[in-house]
Image (tube, rainbow, N blue to C red):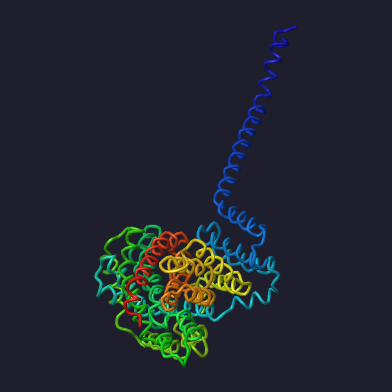
């Protein structure tokens, strides 16, 4: 037996021969372990990212499975559960907001048993047409570069300080929205805000806070001014109608005070808007702390671009003429044919005149936002039709009475808070329509002034600041793509607290002073 045939040599050679295979197996094991670790990390990250969606599902299932409270229908319970779920998703945004709109549509069909055609009809209201048409008009304004000229006109008055630009935007939006509707003003001013942001930085991530300050100045300016005059929104006309219907008696001269005219409304409500103007700018500046405190460079670029564009040409003047004609039509004809019809007509006029192409509109309009607002309105309709909204109001008021807060300051604070909560789940007009009879009746029984409680309700319907779907103006601003849902919540909570405190001061001191 030779040395080469030694058992030890053979064993060594065998191990060496199998070593590459062993190394390969070890490599595969390590690779598989790393793959599993990576997959588990990805799965955990996905679950963590969707945690609020999971929480929402659990909350919704528990709310639907709970015993139905007395006085509330089963359908009403489901609608309330859907509203709570939608509110959580609107605020936390674990999924894209347009997908929440699709969930609302699906829920109405599967959970409420409503025919899909009926749900589809509830989506396409005049308000939705208005949102869609307004966004189209905004694209047309940008196409003709009118937004830059409007922005430069504002900056010439306010200077280049971000705070004063924010105040100027809020002031202009508020003054206009007092008379021609917040939807219109938001659609007109959105390109102005976007222009100032884009000229400051081409990277949206570098101007997140600045974008929040400027764009929310537009939405808040529109929202707080909508209660300043009777023409500022349907909620105001609804409350005026309730006062007349419930309390006016032609045979009793003392009830003439319930015939609230245009000027009387402004005396009560317009100071509220004026006081909120500087508060909005200060609160936004404090909440978001913009990356730039002065926009001198952006304004210099703006001046250069406007100068290079030269004087307005025929297409620019035609665009101004068509837009002014659209605004005039909103004022003169919207009562007869609707705001949405006029908005769509204005967009058609721009297309026919060749001032904007359909490709521009198709790429410039955030269609998901249109769907989002449509679904929010549809859910609000179900809140009313199932009696869920009225049940919430009655339960809330009854609880107040048990707590001894059914009159005076306690009642005013509770009604303001209730209206704010309800308006975050349905339109302001629908909220006032549902809550109005309940709170007016409560005030009359408690011996409080129905005029005061009516103004508290109508004005508080503008305090829905916390979600992108709460106001048409908020929905339009959200369509810019610069804001997140959490931005509305950050400033909205603070603005809500300040607004409720302010309206309580008005109810306790200013309105009794001017009451007749």
Work out whether residue 274 or residue 416 is closer to the camera in this orientation and state it: 416
Q: Is residue 419 left or right of residue 112?
A: left
Q: Is residue 212 left or right of residue 53?
A: left
Q: Residue furthest top?
A: 1
Q: Is residue 229 left or right of residue 22?
A: left
| Image-quadrant location for residue 254 | bottom left
Work out whether residue 509 or residue 280 is closer to the camera in this orientation and state it: 509
The x and y percentages for residue 3 are: 70, 8
| x 64%, y 62%: residue | 69
| x 60%, y 46%: residue | 43
Work out whether residue 415 or residue 344 is closer to the camera in this orientation and state it: 415
The x and y percentages for residue 34 are: 59, 37
| x 48%, y 65%: residue | 467
| Image-quadrant location for residue 33 | top right
Q: Quadrant of the N terminus?
A: top right
Q: Residue furthest right?
A: 1
The x and y percentages for residue 449 are: 42, 76
Work out whether residue 327 or residue 360 is closer to the camera in this orientation and state it: 327
Q: Residue furthest bottom?
A: 251
Q: Quadrant of the C terminus?
A: bottom left
The x and y percentages for residue 67 are: 67, 59
């Amino acid at each position: 037996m030779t040395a080469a045939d030694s058992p030890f040599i053979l064993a060594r050679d065998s191990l060496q021969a199998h070593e590459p295979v062993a190394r390969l197996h070890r490599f595969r094991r390590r690779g598989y372990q790393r793959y599993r670790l990576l997959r588990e990390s990805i799965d955990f990250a996905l679950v963590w990212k969707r945690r609020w969606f999971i929480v929402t599902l659990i909350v919704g299932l528990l709310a639907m499975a709970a015993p139905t409270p007395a006085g509330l229908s089963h359908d009403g319970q489901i609608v309330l559960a859907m509203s709570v779920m939608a509110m959580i998703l609107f605020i936390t945004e674990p999924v894209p907001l347009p997908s929440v709109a699709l969930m609302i549509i699906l829920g109405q069909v599967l959970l409420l048993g409503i025919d899909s055609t009926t749900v589809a009809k509830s989506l396409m209201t005049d308000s939705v047409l208005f949102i869609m048409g307004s966004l189209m008009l905004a694209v047309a304004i940008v196409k003709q570069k009118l937004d830059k000229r409007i922005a430069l006109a504002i900056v010439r008055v306010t200077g280049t300080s971000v705070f004063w630009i924010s105040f100027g935007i809020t002031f202009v939006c508020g003054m206009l929205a007092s008379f021609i509707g917040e939807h219109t003003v938001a659609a007109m001013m959105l390109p102005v805000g976007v222009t100032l942001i884009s000229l400051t930085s081409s990277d949206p991530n570098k101007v997140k806070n600045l974008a929040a300050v400027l764009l929310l100045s537009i939405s808040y300016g529109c929202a707080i001014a909508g209660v300043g005059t009777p023409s500022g929104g349907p909620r105001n006309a609804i409350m005026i109608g309730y006062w007349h219907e419930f309390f006016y008696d032609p045979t009793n001269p003392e009830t003439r005070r319930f015939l609230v005219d245009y000027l009387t409304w402004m005396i009560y409500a317009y100071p509220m808007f004026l006081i909120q103007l500087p508060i909005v700018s200060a609160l936004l500046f404090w909440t978001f702390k913009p990356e730039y405190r002065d926009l001198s460079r952006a304004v210099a670029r703006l001046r250069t671009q406007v100068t290079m564009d030269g004087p307005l040409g025929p297409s620019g003047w035609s665009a101004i003429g068509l837009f002014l004609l659209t605004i005039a039509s909103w004022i003169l004809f919207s009562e007869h044919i609707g705001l949405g019809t006029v908005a769509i007509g204005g967009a058609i006029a721009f297309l026919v005149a060749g001032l904007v192409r359909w490709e521009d509109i198709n790429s410039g309009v955030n269609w998901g936002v249109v769907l989002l607002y449509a679904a929010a309105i549809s859910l609000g309709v179900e809140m009313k039709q199932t009696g869920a909204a009225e049940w919430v109001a009655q339960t809330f008021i009854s609880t107040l009475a048990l707590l001894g807060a059914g009159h005076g300051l306690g009642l005013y604070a509770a009604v303001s808070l209730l209206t704010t909560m309800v308006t975050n789940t349905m339109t302001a007009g629908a909220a006032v329509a549902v809550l109005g009879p309940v709170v007016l009746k409560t005030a009359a029984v408690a011996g409080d002034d129905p005029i005061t409680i009516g103004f508290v309700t109508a004005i508080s319907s503008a305090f829905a600041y916390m979600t992108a779907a709460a106001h048409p103006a908020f929905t339009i601003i959200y369509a810019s793509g610069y804001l997140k849902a959490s931005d509305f919540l950050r400033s909205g909570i603070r603005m809500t607290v300040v607004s409720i405190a302010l309206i309580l001061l008005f109810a306790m001191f200013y309105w009794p002073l001017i009451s007749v």
